[in-house]
Amino acid sequence: MATNPDPMRDRPRPALRFPSRPAIRGTWTFRKVEPVHLKLTLTLPPDADEATAGAVMAKLGELVAELSAADVTAGGKGFRVDIGRSGLRPGPAVELVLVPNHLRGAVERLKRAADLLARSAGGPVVVRVATDADPETPLYQTAA
């Protein structure tokens, strides 16, 4: 007769008992997150030329970098400038379009950024937050 090399192998095992829990049934719904953007329109003096507009855009770029860094420290993912939709406009005016790097909480983050931009722009400015699907209907608008 052979000896059992593992004496614990043949011992009876207790039955596993799980508490009886009802199955959770439900329907998952996902909302599509609409891309949003912030559009800053800064009206320049009538005698402004392209050099002045370029200097204003450079200053706004520095301001956007600071805004993006502040958004990251507040828990967001920052902003970037949409070069295709930004630039010099007739009037003369400078238009700057910001898009969030991540869409979670983007509307609230862009609203905070709009308030900061309106306070620190230093001229007649209109800041609008809107969806990309309907850019003419603002979700939020402020002016200074």
Image (cartoon, rainbow, N blue to C red):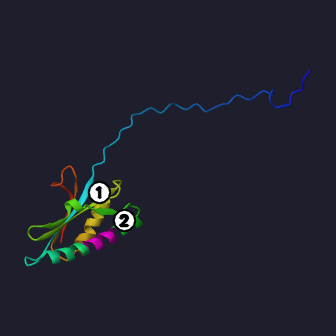
Residue 71 bears which disc, if any?
Answer: 2
* Residue 132 position within the rendered picture, expressed as x and y whole percent measured from the top left: 22, 52
Which quarter of the rendering shows the N terminus? top right
Residue 79 location, quadrant: bottom left
Q: Secondary structure at mark 2?
A: helix
Q: Secondary structure at mark 1?
A: helix
- Earlier sequence position, callout 1 versus callout 2: 2
Which of label 1 and label 2 is nearer to you? Answer: 2
Q: Which region of the structure is painted magenta?
A: 59-67
Residue 107 bears which disc, if any?
Answer: 1
Say which residue appears at 13% left-offset and 70% top-offset.
93
Say which residue appears at 20% left-offset and 60% top-offset.
85
Say which residue appears at 21% left-offset and 77% top-offset.
55
Residue 125 bears which disc, if any?
Answer: none
Q: Give the amino acid at mark 1.
A: Val
Name the main secondary structure of what is drawn in magenta: helix
Q: Nearer the viewer, residue 109 or 25?
A: 109
| Above-or-below relation of 87 to 33 | below
Query: Outermost residue, front direction?
Result: 51
Say if the magenta span includes residue 114: no
* Residue 104 position within the rendered picture, expressed as x and y whole percent measured from the top left: 36, 53
| Above-or-below relation of 110 to 47 | above
Which quarter of the rendering shows the C terminus? bottom left
Q: For label 1, count other residues whose C-alpha is less than 10 Å away and answer few (under 14), some (14-19) or many (20+).
A: many
| Above-or-below relation of 9 to 93 | above
> In the shown orientation, is residue 138 left or right of residue 22?
left
Q: Give the amino acid at mark 2.
A: Asp
